[in-house]
Amino acid sequence: METITNTLYWISTGLLVPVVISLLLLFARALILSGSFFGHYTQKVKTDAVVDKSIKLVNIHNLSLITGNLPEKDKSLLVAYIRKITENKSNQHQLQRLLARFEIDADKDLATSKTLTKLGPILGLMGTLIPMGPALVGLATGDIASMANNMQVAFATTVIGLLTGAIGFITLQVKQRWYLQDFTNLEYLVQLMTQAINEENKASLKS
């Protein structure tokens, strides 16, 4: 039994360095995400103002209006899919496929935030628990300096892990609301185009 416990102890202790390095990499990725999130926010405010204005004016008789007002240099996911949907406005099945593709691409963009939300606290907890073993050993042997050093690592990894998870969680919640709004606008456009297709089919049958 002692051999097993010692093996578990050495395995867990050996994981400390990989855990700390992984946590630092995740934290760096969280900082990069924060910067890109701010840029995404400023761009989305401008894009939404144009798209919402066009959505209110568009109907089945002026579907081309939606693309005419879009900023040419805007490379956001919403604008890209509005253009794709407009290009395929006569293909009802393709329109439904594009809606599904938008959900997939939106989920890809959310993947980083989801990863930070889950892995940040997990690695932080591992970085907290692993040094506790050596810290208790130091306490038992009277090595206060070793115990203090291990406790410092434990508390630091906890804070970094929680902060990383918080950044991931906040960006995830906000982006999910953004993409839900974008999907609603795209779905509305698809419904208009589907209605236009149906009316064209009825007109062709009558003629």
Image: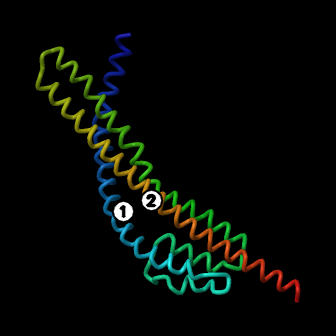
**Residue reaching furthest to the front:** 56
Which labelled disc corresponds to residue 37? 1
Residue 92, picture quadrant: bottom right
Residue 89: percent from left, percent from top: 67, 79
For this view, does 127 lie left or right of residue 171? Answer: left
Q: What residue type is labelled 1?
A: Phe
Q: Which of 10 and 142 is in front in this view?
A: 142
**Residue reaching furthest to the right:** 206
Identify the residue shown where x is 57% and y is 70%. 185
Could you tell me which secondary element the residue under label 2 belongs to? helix
**Residue reaching furthest to the bottom:** 207
For this view, does 181 lie left or right of residue 205? Answer: left
Identify the residue shown where x is 67% and y is 76%. 192
Residue 160, picture quadrant: top left
Image marks 2 and 1: residues in contact by CB distance under 8 Å: yes
Q: What residue type is labelled 2?
A: Lys
Residue 159: percent from left, percent from top: 26, 40
Label 1 Cα neighbours within 10 Å, binned few <14 / some 14-19 / many ≥20: some
Identify the residue shown where x is 38% and y is 15%. 4
Residue 47: percent from left, percent from top: 44, 75
Q: How is the image coloured?
A: rainbow
State the residue position of label 2: 175
The vertical placement of 166 against 73, above or below, is: above
- Give the distance between the C-alpha atoms of the residues marked 2 and 1, in whole angstroms: 9 Å
